[in-house]
Image (cartoon, rainbow, N blue to C red):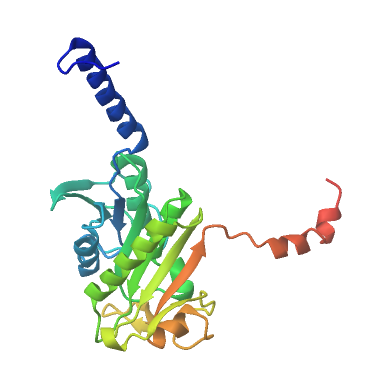
Amino acid sequence: MRIARGSQPGRCILVALVLVLISLSQSTFPAQQPYRILISNDDGFQAPGIKALFNRLKSLGEVTVAAPAANQSGVGHALTLGRPIAVESWEAEGSRWFAITATPATCVRMALTSLLPQLPDVVVSGINKGENPGVVTFSSGTVACAREAAFRDIPAIAVSLEEGAHMDYAAAAEFTARLLLEVRKRGLPRGTYLNINFPARQTDQIKGVLVTRQDKRPADEHYAKKTSPEGKTEYWSVYRPLTGGDKDSDTWVLTQGYISITPMSIDQTLPELGVALRKWDIMKAKK
């Protein structure tokens, strides 16, 4: 049957077809949501590392910054409890910034639970001034930010720049952006995060990128005894970054001039030891 142009049935069919096409486009091809990136650190919101990270990542998605109002280096995964937490917020270059009077882990926890209207797709912490390999990760506020995100199954990256004569925050931020694109494409297993250590070398002298294990050696630290001007005894921390170690460790790789990527997990359970524990006499005792 031929329907004359301009006829009432023809217009009805045309309108119906348009509505069907619109419906199909909305259901089959939904509008892509922006990639939501939360940035934090432990050096404070004014640190050069977080600014370099923001400047590079802002083109990759919808960036929010939630960081300590002042330097909080070395506080580990400590939480701010028992007192009010002040939060200052503002917009800069189309992104929301939060300066929070709290520890790094608390900043991320607050952002994820109380400050953001939606959870981010990824959390990036850094760029820390100074390396964070080995057991230093337990005292690093930078790493704690990533670990806090992993508690909630949000992919996370902690980035630290080795302290030295050639600290290039822009180069470390560029590498982080490339890694972030890989994380977005491939994802990370639940409860895991990546600890990145970037060498303080000129770009053409960085040897490459290696996946590493965490160095398990204790930190090289002692406490020097001194006397204050008032005659009181005091002890001051004397700390030196570790070098060397096993060839697959994050410390060795970093000191050799490679970028280190250490995959980490929040699950600290050791199944092998659990099997041995079940054979102990105390497990056979009557309850």
Write the residue at 81% across / 57% down: 282
Q: Is residue 222 left or right of residue 31?
A: right
Question: Is residue 12 placed above or below 145 in the rendered structure?
Answer: above
Examine the rendering and report whether any part of residue 238 can be seen.
Answer: yes
User: Percent position (x, y) of residue 165?
Assistant: 24, 87
Viewer-closest of 253 and 270: 253
User: Percent position (x, y) of residue 128?
Assistant: 30, 70
Examine the rendering and report whether any part of residue 73 can be seen.
Answer: no
To which quarter of the image does residue 158 belong? bottom left
User: Percent position (x, y) of residue 256?
Assistant: 41, 88
- Where the C terminus falls, by quadrant? top right
Question: Is residue 110 placed above or below 49 in the rendered structure?
Answer: above
Viewer-closest of 236 and 189: 189
Q: Is residue 155 left or right of residue 203?
A: right
To which quarter of the image does residue 183 belong? bottom left
Viewer-closest of 44 and 199: 199
- Where the N terminus falls, by quadrant? top left
User: Percent position (x, y) of residue 239?
Assistant: 39, 81
To which quarter of the image does residue 243 belong? bottom left
Viewer-closest of 79 and 164: 164
Most extreme residue toward the front, as rendered? 1
Write the residue at 42% across / 76% down: 260
